Protein backbone atom coordinates (compact mmCIF):
# COMPACT_ATOMS: atom_id res chain seq x y z
CA UNK A 1 0.00 0.00 0.00
CA UNK A 2 1.54 3.26 -1.18
CA UNK A 3 0.68 6.51 0.59
CA UNK A 4 1.85 9.86 -0.78
CA UNK A 5 1.96 12.22 2.18
CA UNK A 6 3.16 15.03 -0.07
CA UNK A 7 -0.45 15.25 -1.24
CA UNK A 8 -2.07 14.68 2.15
CA UNK A 9 -0.27 17.18 4.35
CA UNK A 10 2.88 18.06 6.26
CA UNK A 11 3.52 15.29 8.79
CA UNK A 12 6.90 14.70 10.40
CA UNK A 13 9.06 12.61 12.66
CA UNK A 14 9.77 15.22 15.29
CA UNK A 15 12.15 13.30 17.55
CA UNK A 16 13.76 9.88 17.91
CA UNK A 17 15.45 7.87 20.63
CA UNK A 18 16.65 4.34 21.31
CA UNK A 19 17.79 2.00 24.05
CA UNK A 20 20.34 -0.80 23.87
CA UNK A 21 21.01 -2.95 26.95
CA UNK A 22 24.41 -2.11 28.45
CA UNK A 23 25.29 -5.80 28.87
CA UNK A 24 27.23 -6.77 25.78
CA UNK A 25 27.76 -10.31 24.52
CA UNK A 26 30.24 -11.02 21.74
CA UNK A 27 29.73 -13.80 19.25
CA UNK A 28 32.76 -15.57 20.70
CA UNK A 29 31.24 -15.41 24.19
CA UNK A 30 27.88 -16.60 22.89
CA UNK A 31 29.36 -19.88 21.67
CA UNK A 32 32.23 -20.32 24.14
CA UNK A 33 30.70 -23.51 25.53
CA UNK A 34 29.19 -24.82 22.27
CA UNK A 35 31.31 -27.61 20.77
CA UNK A 36 31.90 -27.53 17.03
CA UNK A 37 30.85 -23.91 16.49
CA UNK A 38 33.41 -21.56 14.93
CA UNK A 39 32.48 -18.06 16.17
CA UNK A 40 34.93 -16.43 13.77
CA UNK A 41 33.21 -18.13 10.85
CA UNK A 42 29.81 -16.85 12.04
CA UNK A 43 31.25 -13.34 12.36
CA UNK A 44 32.56 -13.55 8.81
CA UNK A 45 29.24 -14.81 7.45
CA UNK A 46 27.04 -12.27 9.27
CA UNK A 47 29.23 -9.25 10.04
CA UNK A 48 27.84 -9.35 13.60
CA UNK A 49 30.44 -9.27 16.39
CA UNK A 50 28.43 -8.25 19.47
CA UNK A 51 24.95 -7.39 20.66
CA UNK A 52 23.15 -6.02 23.69
CA UNK A 53 21.31 -8.59 25.83
CA UNK A 54 18.58 -7.59 28.26
CA UNK A 55 19.00 -8.30 31.96
CA UNK A 56 16.96 -11.14 33.50
CA UNK A 57 14.53 -8.70 35.15
CA UNK A 58 13.73 -6.86 31.90
CA UNK A 59 10.86 -7.61 29.54
CA UNK A 60 10.06 -6.13 26.14
CA UNK A 61 7.88 -3.37 27.60
CA UNK A 62 10.78 -2.26 29.82
CA UNK A 63 13.01 -1.78 26.78
CA UNK A 64 10.31 0.23 24.99
CA UNK A 65 9.76 2.42 28.05
CA UNK A 66 13.48 3.17 28.36
CA UNK A 67 13.65 4.09 24.66
CA UNK A 68 10.59 6.34 24.78
CA UNK A 69 11.10 8.19 28.08
CA UNK A 70 13.52 10.83 26.72
CA UNK A 71 10.91 11.89 24.14
CA UNK A 72 8.32 12.82 26.75
CA UNK A 73 10.28 15.94 27.71
CA UNK A 74 8.95 17.69 24.60
CA UNK A 75 5.83 15.69 23.70
CA UNK A 76 2.64 14.44 25.29
CA UNK A 77 1.43 11.70 22.97
CA UNK A 78 -2.27 10.95 22.67
CA UNK A 79 -1.79 7.64 20.86
CA UNK A 80 0.85 4.92 21.17
CA UNK A 81 1.97 2.13 18.88
CA UNK A 82 4.32 -0.68 19.92
CA UNK A 83 5.81 -2.90 17.22
CA UNK A 84 7.02 -6.25 18.54
CA UNK A 85 6.95 -9.99 17.92
CA UNK A 86 8.34 -10.74 21.39
CA UNK A 87 5.57 -9.47 23.68
CA UNK A 88 5.64 -9.59 27.47
CA UNK A 89 2.64 -11.95 27.44
CA UNK A 90 0.72 -13.82 24.72
CA UNK A 91 -2.34 -11.85 25.82
CA UNK A 92 -3.25 -9.07 26.34
CA UNK A 93 -1.15 -6.66 24.31
CA UNK A 94 2.13 -5.14 25.49
CA UNK A 95 1.42 -1.56 24.36
CA UNK A 96 -0.82 -0.82 27.40
CA UNK A 97 2.10 -1.76 29.67
CA UNK A 98 4.24 0.81 27.86
CA UNK A 99 1.50 3.42 28.28
CA UNK A 100 1.33 2.63 32.00
CA UNK A 101 5.08 2.54 32.50
CA UNK A 102 5.51 5.94 30.84
CA UNK A 103 2.90 7.49 33.14
CA UNK A 104 0.66 8.47 30.25
CA UNK A 105 -3.08 8.93 30.81
CA UNK A 106 -5.46 6.36 29.29
CA UNK A 107 -4.89 6.65 25.54
CA UNK A 108 -5.15 4.22 22.61
CA UNK A 109 -2.17 1.84 22.95
CA UNK A 110 -1.91 -0.65 20.10
CA UNK A 111 0.42 -3.55 19.33
CA UNK A 112 1.72 -3.96 15.77
CA UNK A 113 2.93 -7.43 14.78
CA UNK A 114 4.91 -6.90 11.57
CA UNK A 115 8.28 -8.46 12.47
CA UNK A 116 11.26 -6.56 11.07
CA UNK A 117 9.04 -4.04 9.27
CA UNK A 118 7.25 -3.09 12.50
CA UNK A 119 8.83 0.32 13.12
CA UNK A 120 7.98 1.62 9.63
CA UNK A 121 4.47 0.15 9.84
CA UNK A 122 4.14 2.14 13.06
CA UNK A 123 5.42 5.34 11.45
CA UNK A 124 2.86 4.97 8.66
CA UNK A 125 -0.02 4.43 11.09
CA UNK A 126 1.16 7.32 13.26
CA UNK A 127 1.37 9.65 10.26
CA UNK A 128 -2.28 8.98 9.43
CA UNK A 129 -3.35 9.66 13.01
CA UNK A 130 -1.29 12.84 13.25
CA UNK A 131 -2.77 14.21 10.05
CA UNK A 132 -6.37 13.40 10.95
CA UNK A 133 -6.34 14.22 14.65
CA UNK A 134 -3.47 16.72 14.88
CA UNK A 135 -2.00 15.02 17.95
CA UNK A 136 1.44 13.75 18.90
CA UNK A 137 1.77 10.00 18.32
CA UNK A 138 4.40 7.84 19.99
CA UNK A 139 5.82 4.99 17.93
CA UNK A 140 7.90 2.38 19.75
CA UNK A 141 9.47 -0.84 18.53
CA UNK A 142 11.09 -3.30 20.89
CA UNK A 143 12.38 -6.85 20.70
CA UNK A 144 13.78 -9.18 23.33
CA UNK A 145 14.73 -12.08 21.12
CA UNK A 146 17.37 -13.52 23.44
CA UNK A 147 14.65 -15.32 25.44
CA UNK A 148 13.51 -17.15 22.30
CA UNK A 149 16.93 -18.37 21.20
CA UNK A 150 18.17 -20.65 23.99
CA UNK A 151 17.70 -23.81 21.93
CA UNK A 152 17.92 -22.21 18.48
CA UNK A 153 20.57 -23.28 15.98
CA UNK A 154 23.90 -21.39 16.10
CA UNK A 155 23.16 -19.80 12.74
CA UNK A 156 20.04 -18.22 14.21
CA UNK A 157 21.34 -17.43 17.70
CA UNK A 158 24.27 -15.42 16.33
CA UNK A 159 22.01 -12.98 14.49
CA UNK A 160 19.86 -11.36 17.13
CA UNK A 161 20.20 -8.71 19.81
CA UNK A 162 17.81 -6.96 22.18
CA UNK A 163 16.80 -3.30 22.12
CA UNK A 164 14.16 -0.69 21.37
CA UNK A 165 13.53 2.47 19.37
CA UNK A 166 11.01 5.28 19.67
CA UNK A 167 9.80 8.28 17.68
CA UNK A 168 7.31 11.12 17.98
CA UNK A 169 5.21 11.78 14.87
CA UNK A 170 3.25 15.03 14.59
CA UNK A 171 1.75 17.38 12.04
CA UNK A 172 3.69 20.36 10.78
CA UNK A 173 6.85 20.50 12.90
CA UNK A 174 9.93 18.38 13.30
CA UNK A 175 13.19 17.50 11.61
CA UNK A 176 12.08 14.76 9.19
CA UNK A 177 9.11 15.30 6.89
CA UNK A 178 7.47 12.06 5.78
CA UNK A 179 7.10 12.25 2.00
CA UNK A 180 5.69 8.78 1.29
CA UNK A 181 5.43 5.24 2.61
CA UNK A 182 4.84 1.80 1.18
CA UNK A 183 3.86 -1.17 3.39
CA UNK A 184 3.20 -4.73 2.32
CA UNK A 185 2.87 -8.37 3.41
CA UNK A 186 3.01 -11.68 1.54
CA UNK A 187 1.80 -14.62 3.64
CA UNK A 188 3.30 -17.19 1.27
CA UNK A 189 6.53 -16.82 3.25
CA UNK A 190 4.92 -17.02 6.67
CA UNK A 191 6.64 -20.23 7.72
CA UNK A 192 10.18 -19.22 6.81
CA UNK A 193 11.04 -17.57 10.13
CA UNK A 194 8.65 -18.49 12.91
CA UNK A 195 8.07 -19.48 16.52
CA UNK A 196 5.95 -22.52 15.76
CA UNK A 197 4.10 -23.16 19.03
CA UNK A 198 2.31 -21.15 21.68
CA UNK A 199 -0.55 -19.84 19.54
CA UNK A 200 -3.85 -21.38 18.51
CA UNK A 201 -2.38 -23.41 15.63
CA UNK A 202 -0.10 -25.35 17.96
CA UNK A 203 -1.04 -24.75 21.58
CA UNK A 204 1.55 -25.22 24.30
CA UNK A 205 1.84 -28.90 25.27
CA UNK A 206 4.49 -31.13 26.76
CA UNK A 207 5.21 -32.32 23.22
CA UNK A 208 5.80 -28.80 21.83
CA UNK A 209 8.13 -28.06 24.74
CA UNK A 210 10.10 -31.28 24.25
CA UNK A 211 10.42 -30.58 20.52
CA UNK A 212 11.70 -27.00 21.11
CA UNK A 213 8.86 -25.48 19.10
CA UNK A 214 8.82 -22.36 21.26
CA UNK A 215 12.16 -21.13 19.98
CA UNK A 216 12.72 -19.05 16.85
CA UNK A 217 13.18 -21.33 13.84
CA UNK A 218 14.68 -20.59 10.42
CA UNK A 219 15.15 -23.91 8.70
CA UNK A 220 16.22 -22.71 5.24
CA UNK A 221 18.71 -19.93 5.81
CA UNK A 222 19.71 -19.45 2.14
CA UNK A 223 16.06 -19.07 1.07
CA UNK A 224 15.48 -16.50 3.81
CA UNK A 225 18.64 -14.66 2.76
CA UNK A 226 17.49 -14.27 -0.83
CA UNK A 227 13.90 -13.48 0.21
CA UNK A 228 15.17 -10.67 2.45
CA UNK A 229 17.24 -9.19 -0.36
CA UNK A 230 14.32 -9.46 -2.78
CA UNK A 231 12.04 -7.87 -0.18
CA UNK A 232 14.37 -4.90 0.26
CA UNK A 233 14.71 -4.38 -3.48
CA UNK A 234 11.02 -4.84 -4.33
CA UNK A 235 9.66 -2.46 -1.70
CA UNK A 236 12.30 0.18 -2.49
CA UNK A 237 11.67 0.01 -6.22
CA UNK A 238 7.90 0.11 -5.72
CA UNK A 239 8.08 3.15 -3.45
CA UNK A 240 10.51 5.08 -5.62
CA UNK A 241 8.56 4.24 -8.78
CA UNK A 242 5.30 5.44 -7.25
CA UNK A 243 7.00 8.67 -6.19
CA UNK A 244 8.52 9.26 -9.62
CA UNK A 245 12.04 8.91 -8.20
CA UNK A 246 15.09 6.71 -8.72
CA UNK A 247 17.91 5.60 -6.44
CA UNK A 248 19.80 8.75 -7.47
CA UNK A 249 17.18 10.85 -5.66
CA UNK A 250 17.98 9.23 -2.30
CA UNK A 251 20.92 10.52 -0.28
CA UNK A 252 20.95 8.06 2.63
CA UNK A 253 19.36 4.64 3.16
CA UNK A 254 18.78 3.33 6.68
CA UNK A 255 17.90 -0.36 6.29
CA UNK A 256 16.69 -2.98 8.72
CA UNK A 257 19.90 -4.32 10.24
CA UNK A 258 19.44 -7.94 9.16
CA UNK A 259 23.07 -8.96 8.71
CA UNK A 260 25.95 -7.41 6.82
CA UNK A 261 25.87 -9.80 3.86
CA UNK A 262 22.18 -9.13 3.24
CA UNK A 263 22.77 -5.37 3.42
CA UNK A 264 25.70 -5.52 1.01
CA UNK A 265 23.84 -7.63 -1.55
CA UNK A 266 20.74 -5.43 -1.35
CA UNK A 267 22.88 -2.30 -1.79
CA UNK A 268 24.45 -3.76 -4.93
CA UNK A 269 21.09 -4.70 -6.43
CA UNK A 270 19.66 -1.27 -5.64
CA UNK A 271 22.76 0.39 -7.15
CA UNK A 272 23.39 2.32 -3.94
CA UNK A 273 26.86 3.71 -3.30
CA UNK A 274 28.40 2.34 -0.06
CA UNK A 275 28.63 5.81 1.50
CA UNK A 276 24.82 6.15 1.29
CA UNK A 277 24.17 2.95 3.24
CA UNK A 278 23.89 3.05 7.05
CA UNK A 279 25.03 -0.05 8.96
CA UNK A 280 25.47 -0.53 12.70
CA UNK A 281 24.80 -4.26 12.57
CA UNK A 282 28.31 -5.20 13.73
CA UNK A 283 27.72 -4.07 17.31
CA UNK A 284 23.94 -4.48 17.69
CA UNK A 285 22.91 -7.45 15.60
CA UNK A 286 19.42 -7.91 14.25
CA UNK A 287 16.87 -6.37 16.66
CA UNK A 288 13.87 -7.27 14.52
CA UNK A 289 11.33 -4.49 14.19
CA UNK A 290 13.39 -2.12 16.35
CA UNK A 291 16.61 -2.30 14.36
CA UNK A 292 15.78 0.27 11.67
CA UNK A 293 14.59 2.70 14.35
CA UNK A 294 17.74 2.19 16.41
CA UNK A 295 19.95 2.66 13.34
CA UNK A 296 17.96 5.76 12.30
CA UNK A 297 18.41 7.39 15.71
CA UNK A 298 22.08 6.47 15.88
CA UNK A 299 22.67 7.89 12.40
CA UNK A 300 20.87 11.09 13.35
CA UNK A 301 22.94 11.53 16.49
CA UNK A 302 26.12 10.70 14.53
CA UNK A 303 25.45 13.59 12.13
CA UNK A 304 24.72 11.48 9.07
CA UNK A 305 21.85 13.69 7.88
CA UNK A 306 21.91 17.23 6.48
CA UNK A 307 19.16 19.69 5.62
CA UNK A 308 17.62 18.98 2.22
CA UNK A 309 18.64 15.33 2.06
CA UNK A 310 16.19 12.55 1.27
CA UNK A 311 16.44 9.56 3.57
CA UNK A 312 14.87 6.14 3.00
CA UNK A 313 13.94 3.79 5.84
CA UNK A 314 13.95 0.31 4.31
CA UNK A 315 12.76 -2.94 5.88
CA UNK A 316 11.90 -6.53 5.02
CA UNK A 317 11.27 -9.40 7.38
CA UNK A 318 9.33 -12.42 8.54
CA UNK A 319 5.80 -12.89 7.42
CA UNK A 320 6.93 -11.90 4.77
CA UNK A 321 6.50 -8.21 5.59
CA UNK A 322 8.14 -5.20 4.00
CA UNK A 323 7.92 -1.46 4.48
CA UNK A 324 9.74 1.66 3.35
CA UNK A 325 9.46 5.38 3.89
CA UNK A 326 11.10 8.38 2.22
CA UNK A 327 11.81 11.34 4.46
CA UNK A 328 13.12 14.85 3.78
CA UNK A 329 15.51 16.43 6.27
CA UNK A 330 14.01 19.83 7.09
CA UNK A 331 16.52 21.19 9.59
Image (spheres, rainbow, N blue to C red):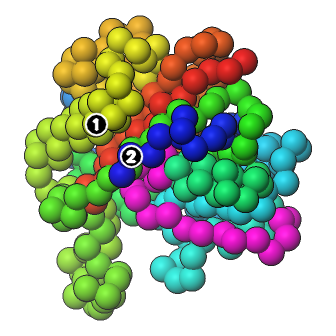
Q: Which residue is mark 1?
A: 238
Residue 98 in which image quadrant: bottom right
Q: What residue sits 35% from the left and 81% below the top?
A: 198
Of 209 and 142, the residue lying toward us: 142
The answer, for residue 177, to whether it is visible in the render is: yes
Query: What range of the chain is rendered magenta?
Result: 103-121
Q: Would residue 68 appear left or right of 95 to someone viewing this image?
A: right
Q: Is 105 colored magenta in this rendering? A: yes
Q: Would residue 113 appear left or right of 142 to someone viewing this image?
A: left
- Structural distance between the alpha carbons of marks 2 and 1: 8 Å
Q: Which mark is residue 2?
A: 2
Q: What residue sits 68% from the left and 61% below the top?
A: 80
Quarter of the image for the C terminus: give it.
top right
Q: What residue sits 63% from the left and 41% below the top?
A: 9
- Whichever of labels 2 and 1 marks the residue nearer the N terminus, that label is 2
Of 303 and 176, the residue lying toward us: 176
Q: Would residue 66 appear left or right of 262 to someone viewing this image?
A: right
The answer, for residue 147, to whether it is visible in the render is: no
Q: Which mark is residue 67?
A: none
Vertical placement of residue 122 versus 14, above or below: below
Vertical placement of residue 298 versus 126, above or below: above
Expressed as whole percent of the image width and height from the top left, the position of residue 203 reads 31, 89
Circle 2/circle 1 CB separation < 8 Å: yes
Q: Residues within 10 Å of mark 2 (few under 14, many from 20)?
A: some
Amino acid sequence: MFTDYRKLGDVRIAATSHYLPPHRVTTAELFRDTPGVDAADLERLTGIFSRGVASPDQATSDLAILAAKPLLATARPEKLYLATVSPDYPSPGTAPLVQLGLGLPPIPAIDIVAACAGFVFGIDEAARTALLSEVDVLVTAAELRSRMLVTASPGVRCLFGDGAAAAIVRKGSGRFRILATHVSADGSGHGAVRVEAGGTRHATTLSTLERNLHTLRMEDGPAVFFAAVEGFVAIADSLLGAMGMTDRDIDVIVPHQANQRILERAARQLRIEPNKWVSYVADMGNIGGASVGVAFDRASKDGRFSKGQRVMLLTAGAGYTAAAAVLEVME
